[in-house]
Image (cartoon, rainbow, N blue to C red):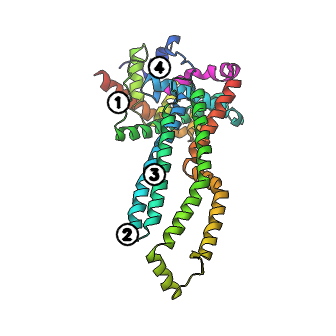
Amino acid sequence: MSNDFYTSSILPYSGIIIKICRAYTDSQEDFEDYYQEVCLQIWRSKDKFRGDSKWSTWVYRLSLNICLTLMKKKRKTHQYYSTDNIVQNEFTDDKTIFSDENLNLLYEAIKQLSEVDRAVILLYLEEKPNKIIAEIIGTTPNNIGVRISRIKERLKKILNEKIN
Amino acid sequence: MKKSIESIWKNGFLDKETILLPKLNNLSSQKSIHIIDKFKRRFKININALIVFSFIILVISFIVKIQIMGILIFILLNIVAIINKKLLKSLKKIDKNVSSYWYLKSFDTWMQAQIAFNMKMSRYIYPYVTIALSSGFWYSSSFQKALDDLFGGYNPYIIYGIPIYWVIVTLCIVILSTIFGARIYKWDLNLVYGSTLKKLDELIKDMETLRTQ
């Protein structure tokens, strides 16, 4: 991957990529692997970008899809090793990844959501319009609106439970 | 919780240090280890399957009274298993403390040497199997009886004690399997390890592109 491509086409979106990767991983090691894989896949697939959507939208969509795929693969591998008793407790609880305690709590709550709901709320929190979120997830903006309200309610509930 | 999730998010990420970029190094290391581990597992399973299969053939050959064939195949499969076990041992010696690229390259070199060796062996293995089957069946009394039942008093054309047609057919198959042995092995290899080899090839190509850019 050329430095130019990384600096101009990935780095400006690294913030959201990091946030997405954090939401789908449980350890620093996994997070770094996911981030690397997302960057590598963006670079590999760059020729497939047809310009139907904005580059940023395409990057978000790709990042989410890669994280979801990696998560499924990881689960399969984990199951395989677990049954063979080769590697146990591969995942470590990394609850204090950010200096902000509230942010850590919020991430913990987000990780309790379904995979799709995590994607929706991450994009919402990044202030993406419902139309763009719908485009990335593959649904209608109306559905996204309703979904966001439900997710927010759920998050509030989880956060309150955590605090109390 | 008094703060809204939006404000937690916003305030949490105000500090730029919160989003520390991970270093992009040792790309695809996990992937390469995963591919090679997958191959090792399958290779080990296949060696064990060969040994188990050799015993099954041996037992069956004694039951159906084609002992010569059973013994010959048993010896062959165990020799192949022993050779491949040695190859697996040399695979385990590949140094993991190098970059993913060199790890994959070492594996690829091992793989090519292994394929070349097995292709050479195949030129002898398939003819050997043909001879084992042919002689096994020919000297089997139950097979002779089956031929008698099928053709009603089968009387083979024999010159100086040699069943001419039987030997000609066997020789033809032996020659063909000597010529096509390597190709049959390649076909068999692709059937079992095709997807893994393809992934390995893609990964090496990818890494080579990464290195040149």
* 3D distance between C-alphas at marks 2 and 3: 20 Å
* 3D distance between C-alphas at marks 4 and 1: 30 Å
Residue assigned mark 4:
B9
Q: Please, what secondary structure does the residue beneath circle 3 have?
A: helix
Chain letter behind tag 3: B
- Residue A8: image x %, image y %? 68, 20
A45 versus B127 height, above or below: above
Within the magenta stretch, is there residue A6?
A: yes
Q: Please, what secondary structure does the residue beneath circle 1 have?
A: loop
Q: Quadrant of the N terminus of chain A?
A: top right
Sequence order check, earlier mark of 4 and 2: 4
Q: Magenta region: which residues?
A: A1-21
* Residue B128 seen anywhere in this rendered image of the structure: yes
**What's under tag 3, amino acid-wise?**
Asn
Q: In front: A62, or B152?
A: B152
Q: Which mark is residue B63?
A: 2
Hey, which quadrant is residue A83 in on the image? Answer: top left
